[in-house]
Image: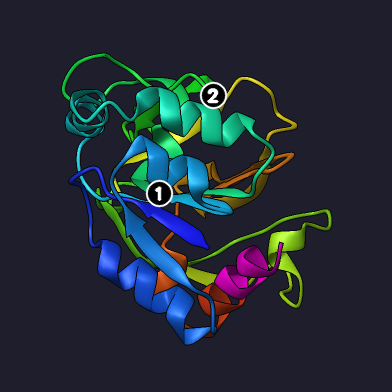
C-alpha cells in the first residue's frame, strides 16, 4: 500500500486519484503507525515551508517521516514535499527542514538577470524537464517531457549528485532529486497528465 502523508497541507485527494488512475492502491495516512506500515510513502504538499514543518512537528510526524525516508522503502516527495527534505528553507524567515538532504530552499530572484524581467514568481505552468541518466521513476519517459509547476522557491542541493532533473526558468534549477530509495519532484506529477501518470505508475511498481 502507498501511504500519502496528511499533515494539513495540500490537496491530498488529487495525489490519491492520480495513483488510482494507474491502478495503484493509495491511502491517506495521518499517524506514525500508518506511515510505518506503508510499503511506499509519499510526502506531498502545497503552501509555506515554515507552516508545513510546524504542522509535521505538531502532529509528531517529523521522526516517522525521517525514518520512512531512511528505511529503504520507496519514498516520493512532491512540490513542498521535496523542499521539506532539505536542511533549511528561507520562506518568511529561516526554518529548519527535515535534514534528509543537505542543502537549502531559496526564492527565485531575477534581479540583474538580462532578459528575465518579464518572468513572474511564482513559476506557474508547464516546463520541460531534462535529465541525463536512467532512473526507474522515468522509465518510458524521455528527457524534455513537460510537467506542471506551481512554486516560488526551489532547492539547491549541496551534493550535485543528488540532483537528477533540471528546468530552466530564468536560469537552470534543480526540479527533481534522486538518492537511493528517495525521489522527489518540484513539479506535480498528479497534474501533469500522461507524463505525470507514467511517473506515478513507475513509483507504484518499485
Question: Where's the C terminus, which quadrant?
Answer: bottom right
Q: Main secondary structure of the magenta part?
A: helix
Question: Which residues are drawn in magenta?
Answer: 199-206
In this rendering, is residue 168 above or below 59? Answer: below
Write the residue at 17% across / 31% down: 51
Q: Which mark is residue 115?
A: 1
Callout 2–callout 1 Cβ contact below 8 Å: no
How many discs appear?
A: 2
> Would residue 202 be counted in the magenta stretch?
yes
Q: Nearer the viewer, residue 167 or 139?
A: 139
Q: Secondary structure at mark 1?
A: loop
Residue 1 at x, y percent in the picture? 53, 63
Q: Secondary structure at mark 2?
A: loop
In this rendering, is residue 36 above or below 49? Answer: below
* Residue count near mark 2 (Cα–Cα under 10 Å), binned few <14, some 14–19, many ≥20: some
Residue 95 at x, y percent in the picture? 27, 16
Disc 2 designates what residue? 100
* Residue count near mark 1 (Cα–Cα under 10 Å), binned few <14, some 14–19, many ≥20: few
Amino acid at each position: 500500500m502507498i501511504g500519502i502523508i496528511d499533515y494539513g497541507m495540500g490537496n491530498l485527494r488529487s495525489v490519491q486519484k492520480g495513483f488510482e488512475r494507474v491502478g495503484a492502491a493509495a491511502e491517506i495516512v495521518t499517524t506514525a503507525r500508518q506511515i510505518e506500515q506503508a510499503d511506499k510513502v509519499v510526502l506531498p504538499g502545497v503552501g509555506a515551508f515554515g507552516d508545513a514543518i510546524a504542522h509535521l512537528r505538531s502532529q509528531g510526524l517529523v521522526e516517522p517521516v525521517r525514518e520512512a525516508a531512511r528505511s529503504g522503502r520507496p519514498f516520493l516527495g512532491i512540490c513542498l514535499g521535496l523542499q521539506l527534505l532539505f536542511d533549511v528553507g528561507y520562506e518568511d524567515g529561516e526554518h529548519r527542514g527535515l535534514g534528509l538532504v543537505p542543502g537549502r530552499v531559496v526564492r527565485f530572484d531575477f534581479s540583474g538577470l538580462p532578459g528575465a524581467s518579464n518572468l513572474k514568481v511564482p513559476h506557474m505552468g508547464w516546463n520541460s524537464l531534462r535529465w541525463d541518466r536512467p532512473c526507474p521513476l522515468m522509465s518510458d519517459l524521455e528527457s524534455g517531457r513537460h510537467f506542471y509547476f506551481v512554486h516560488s522557491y526551489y532547492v539547491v542541493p549541496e551534493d550535485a549528485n543528488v540532483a537528477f532533473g533540471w528546468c530552466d526558468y530564468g536560469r537552470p534549477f534543480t526540479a527533481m532529486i534522486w538518492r537511493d530509495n528517495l525521489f522527489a519532484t518540484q513539479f506535480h506529477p498528479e497534474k501533469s497528465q500522461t507524463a505525470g501518470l507514467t511517473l506515478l505508475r513507475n513509483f507504484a511498481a518499485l
